[in-house]
Image (cartoon, rainbow, N blue to C red):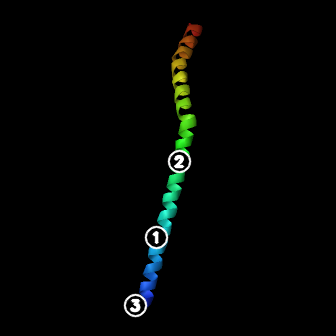
Amino acid sequence: MSNFDDFEDDDTMMAKEALKEMLVSEIEIIRDTLSIVNMFFGENLKAGFKMLQELEPNKINDNNEQTS
């Protein structure tokens, strides 16, 4: 009986290590993907949102002047 328990523990440890490697690999892929997306879109989106924020008050003021 003890030999069977030892065999089961070894398989469990191997499964845990394999699962850990798979999870770490997936996390690294996600991290790399987000870095690439941020490199191409991050600064452009920030600049675009900033431009829209600067234009929005002008749009509101233009609407108020037209209704007055």
Q: CA distance from mark 3 to mark 2?
A: 45 Å
User: Residue shown at 52%/58% (left/top)?
Assistant: 25
In this rendering, the answer to whether 13 lies above or below 5 is above
Secondary-structure class at tag 2? helix
Q: CA distance from mark 1 to mark 3?
A: 21 Å
In this rendering, the answer to whether 54 lies above or below 14 is above
User: Residue shown at 46%/69% (left/top)?
Assistant: 17
Amino acid beneath label 1: Lys
Percent x, y of residue 48: 56, 26
Badge nearest the viewer, 3 or 2: 2
In this rendering, the answer to whether 1 lies above or below 36 is below
In this rendering, the answer to whether 40 lies above or below 48 is below
Which residue is identified by label 1? 16
Q: CA distance from mark 2 to mark 1?
A: 24 Å
Does label 2 or label 1 sit earlier along the sequence? 1
Which residue is identified by label 2? 32
Secondary-structure class at tag 3? helix
User: Residue shown at 54%/16% (left/top)?
Assistant: 60
Is 66 on the left or on the right of 20, as rendered?
right
Q: Which of the image's four quarters has the C terminus?
A: top right
Query: Dot 1, crowdedness within 10 Å: few (<14), some or many (≥20)?
Result: few
Does label 1 or label 3 sit earlier along the sequence? 3
Is disc 1 in contact with disc 3, using a CB cutoff of under 8 Å?
Answer: no
- Give the number of the disc on residue 2: 3
Amino acid beneath label 3: Ser
Amino acid beneath label 2: Asp
Percent x, y of residue 3: 43, 90
Secondary-structure class at tag 1? helix
